[in-house]
Structures are given as structure tokens and as C-alpha cells.
Amino acid sequence: MLDETSPILITCMPLYTALQHLNLMLPRLKMFYLNAGNEVELEVGAIIDRHEHPEMVEILIKRETRTGSYALGEKVRFDASEFHEIAFACHMFAGDLASKLPVKQTKRTAT
């Protein structure tokens, strides 16, 4: 059974032995606010200081891509928040894919 400390081993089939790295490009949602034109990412438990920012602060969200590179055979470890980010990326990918699938029109029968 996997827990938050279980490593995941990245391997490849002999056919792909020329490849030396697995590159993952995962979409994520970044929540941030602007401070003097610079993006400041919000993290869990972040507090925006009202003395530093007496005006209303607008919280913004944008989609960005995070890239990770892993050597073949490397043990990959991630914590619960990283797992959540990967799972959410899969959810976003599935939603994007599903929205692009054709919709089958069904004939309605007269009642």
C-alpha cells in the first residue's frame, strides 16, 4: 500500500533505452496578488498584511505549466500537496479533453 513516503520508481522499456529522462509538464492553477507589479503567490496559511497593503488586494488566478524532469531509475518522492497538484493536473487534462470530444446527437421519439 502506498503512503506519502512511498517512492515511485520511474523505469522504461528496453526499446526506449536511448531516453534518459522523463519530463512532466503539468498544468496548475496559480493564485497570486500583485505587489508593486510583481506576482506574489499565495500559499497555505498566507496572510496579506493590511499595514503593507491598506488598499483592497485583488486575488488573481491563472493557469501555468510546471515542468519536472526525472532521470530514469530515479526514485521520485512527493508529499501530499504535490500529489494533490498532480491529481488536479490530471483532472484539468481530462476536463479539457472531454470538452473537445464530439457530442452524439440522439433522435427523440415522439410521445
Image (tube, rainbow, N blue to C red):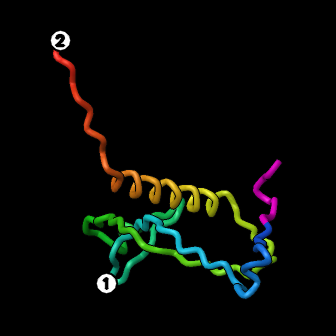
Q: Residue at x 36, y 74 (%)?
A: 52
Q: Quadrant of residue 55?
A: bottom left
The amino acid pointed to by label 2 is Thr
Q: Residue at x 80, y 68 (%)?
A: 9
The residue pinned by badge 1 equals 36
Q: Residue at x 41, y 57 (%)?
A: 97
**Marks 2 and 1 close (CB-CB < 8 Å):** no
Q: Nearer the viewer, mark 2 or mark 1?
A: 2
Query: Does label 2 or label 1 sit earlier along the sequence?
Result: 1
Q: Is residue 91 left or right of residue 13?
A: left
Q: Residue at x 33, y 64 (%)?
A: 59
Q: Quadrant of residue 39?
A: bottom left
| CA–CA distance in space, label 2 to label 1 | 64 Å
Residue 7 inside the magenta-drawn segment? yes
Label number found at residue 111 = 2
Q: Which residues are magenta?
A: 1-8
Q: Nearer the viewer, residue 50 or 17?
A: 17
CA neighbours of label 1 inside 10 A, class few (<14), some (14 to 19), many (20+): few
